[in-house]
Amino acid sequence: MAKKEKPIGEITHVFAKIGVAVIKFSQPVSVGDEIRIKGHSEDFSQVIESMQIEHEQVKKAKKGQEVGMKMDGKVHEGDKIYFEE
Protein backbone atom coordinates (compact mmCIF):
# COMPACT_ATOMS: atom_id res chain seq x y z
CA MET A 1 0.00 0.00 0.00
CA ALA A 2 1.37 3.42 -0.95
CA LYS A 3 2.01 5.81 1.91
CA LYS A 4 0.36 9.22 2.00
CA GLU A 5 2.70 11.98 0.92
CA LYS A 6 2.84 15.09 3.08
CA PRO A 7 3.40 18.40 1.26
CA ILE A 8 6.49 20.40 2.24
CA GLY A 9 5.44 23.55 0.41
CA GLU A 10 3.03 25.28 -1.93
CA ILE A 11 3.42 27.55 -4.93
CA THR A 12 2.09 31.00 -4.02
CA HIS A 13 2.93 32.92 -7.20
CA VAL A 14 4.08 32.15 -10.74
CA PHE A 15 6.10 34.31 -13.11
CA ALA A 16 5.24 32.29 -16.23
CA LYS A 17 7.26 34.34 -18.74
CA ILE A 18 10.54 33.63 -16.93
CA GLY A 19 9.62 30.17 -15.61
CA VAL A 20 9.96 31.11 -11.94
CA ALA A 21 7.68 30.20 -9.05
CA VAL A 22 7.49 31.55 -5.51
CA ILE A 23 7.25 28.66 -3.07
CA LYS A 24 6.36 28.87 0.62
CA PHE A 25 8.02 25.95 2.38
CA SER A 26 6.59 24.35 5.53
CA GLN A 27 9.92 22.71 6.37
CA PRO A 28 13.59 23.43 5.62
CA VAL A 29 15.00 22.64 2.17
CA SER A 30 18.44 23.06 0.62
CA VAL A 31 20.00 23.44 -2.80
CA GLY A 32 20.58 19.90 -4.09
CA ASP A 33 17.37 18.47 -2.61
CA GLU A 34 15.11 16.66 -5.07
CA ILE A 35 11.49 17.77 -4.97
CA ARG A 36 8.28 16.73 -6.69
CA ILE A 37 5.70 19.23 -7.96
CA LYS A 38 2.11 18.00 -8.17
CA GLY A 39 -0.89 19.93 -9.38
CA HIS A 40 -4.05 19.51 -11.42
CA SER A 41 -2.18 19.09 -14.71
CA GLU A 42 1.44 18.54 -13.72
CA ASP A 43 3.48 15.97 -11.84
CA PHE A 44 7.25 16.17 -12.24
CA SER A 45 10.46 16.03 -10.21
CA GLN A 46 13.46 18.31 -10.22
CA VAL A 47 16.58 19.04 -8.21
CA ILE A 48 16.73 22.44 -6.51
CA GLU A 49 19.60 24.11 -8.37
CA SER A 50 19.22 27.59 -6.88
CA MET A 51 16.88 29.60 -4.70
CA GLN A 52 16.49 33.33 -4.12
CA ILE A 53 15.00 35.36 -1.30
CA GLU A 54 14.53 39.06 -2.15
CA HIS A 55 16.83 38.63 -5.21
CA GLU A 56 19.66 37.20 -3.07
CA GLN A 57 20.96 33.68 -3.68
CA VAL A 58 20.50 31.34 -0.71
CA LYS A 59 21.60 27.74 -0.11
CA LYS A 60 18.83 26.91 2.38
CA ALA A 61 15.27 27.96 3.08
CA LYS A 62 13.84 27.77 6.58
CA LYS A 63 10.33 26.72 7.52
CA GLY A 64 7.87 29.46 6.58
CA GLN A 65 10.16 31.25 4.13
CA GLU A 66 9.11 32.08 0.59
CA VAL A 67 11.73 31.58 -2.10
CA GLY A 68 11.90 32.14 -5.83
CA MET A 69 12.95 29.14 -7.87
CA LYS A 70 13.35 28.37 -11.58
CA MET A 71 10.96 25.55 -12.52
CA ASP A 72 11.63 22.76 -15.04
CA GLY A 73 7.96 22.55 -16.04
CA LYS A 74 4.77 24.57 -16.17
CA VAL A 75 3.29 25.17 -12.70
CA HIS A 76 0.30 26.95 -11.18
CA GLU A 77 -0.50 28.74 -7.94
CA GLY A 78 -1.65 26.22 -5.35
CA ASP A 79 0.46 23.33 -6.69
CA LYS A 80 1.96 21.29 -3.85
CA ILE A 81 5.65 20.51 -3.34
CA TYR A 82 6.86 17.19 -1.88
CA PHE A 83 10.24 15.63 -1.16
CA GLU A 84 11.00 13.09 -3.89
CA GLU A 85 11.07 9.58 -2.39
Image (spheres, rainbow, N blue to C red):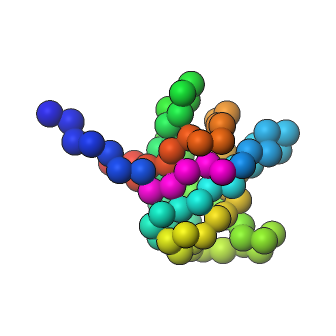
Magenta run includes residue 22:
no
Whole-percent x and y of residue 9? 51, 55
User: What secondary structure do most residues of the magenta stretch adopt?
Assistant: strand
Range of magenta residues: 8-12
Residue 72 shows in the view: no
79 vs 42: above or below: below
Q: Hey, which residue is sitting farthest right in the picture?
A: 17
Identify which residue is drawn at 51% across, 44% down: 80
From the viewer's side, name the closer residue of 55 and 13: 13
Q: Quadrant of residue 64?
A: bottom right
Q: Hey, which residue is sitting farthest left in the picture?
A: 1
From the viewer's side, name the closer residue of 19 and 63: 63
Whole-percent x and y of residue 38? 49, 37
Q: Quadrant of residue 14?
A: top right
37 vs 54: above or below: above
Using residue 69 as the reference point, say whether residue 63 is left or right of it.
Answer: left
Whole-percent x and y of residue 47? 53, 52
12 vs 55: above or below: above
Magenta run includes residue 10:
yes
Identify which residue is drawn at 65% across, 37% down: 75
Using residue 6 as the reference point, say whether residue 70 is left or right of it.
Answer: right
Q: Quadrant of residue 78?
A: top right
Residue 82 shows in the view: yes
